Image (spheres, rainbow, N blue to C red):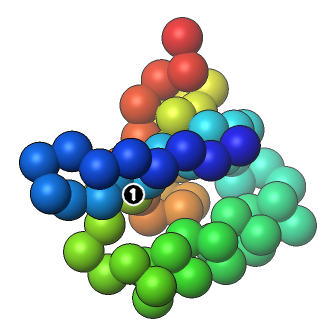
Amino acid sequence: MMGAWKRSGSLRIALLGPYYSRNLGDTATQLSMVQNLRRLHPDADTFGISPDPADTIAAIGIDAFPLS
């Protein structure tokens, strides 16, 4: 699930989901999505909302916040 909104003139994109590095297929899909978002919206602030923010930061390379 993905939501995007504008605040203070800059695009912020939140990616909500199980962003873990424990499944290589899921990680590849997530990395592809983040790369495309960066290509299409290079100035956007992209971050994850996940059960394990430290893992999301390390595996996907985006800032992350806890799901709960």
Q: Position of residue 55 (x, y in %)?
A: 54, 44
Q: Position of residue 49 (x, y in %)?
A: 52, 34
Residue 38 against residue 55 in the figure, above or below: below
Observer-nearest residue: 30 or 55?
30
Residue at the spot of label 1: 46
Residue 55 visible in the picture: no
Q: Residue at x 39, y 47 (%)?
A: 5
Q: Residue at x 45, y 88 (%)?
A: 39
Query: In which quadrant will I find the N terminus?
Result: top right
Q: Residue at x 77, y 69 (%)?
A: 29
Q: Residue furthest bottom?
A: 39
Residue 63 against residue 29 in the figure, above or below: above
Residue 31 against residue 64 in the figure, above or below: below
Q: Residue at x 15, y 57 (%)?
A: 9
Q: Quadrant of residue 45?
A: bottom left
Instruction: Specify whether 29 is left or right of 19.
Output: right
Of the residues shown, which amino acid type is indicated by label 1? Thr
Circle 1 packing at 10 Å, graded few (<14), some (14-19), many (20+), is many
Instruction: Specify whether 68 is left or right of 57.
Output: right
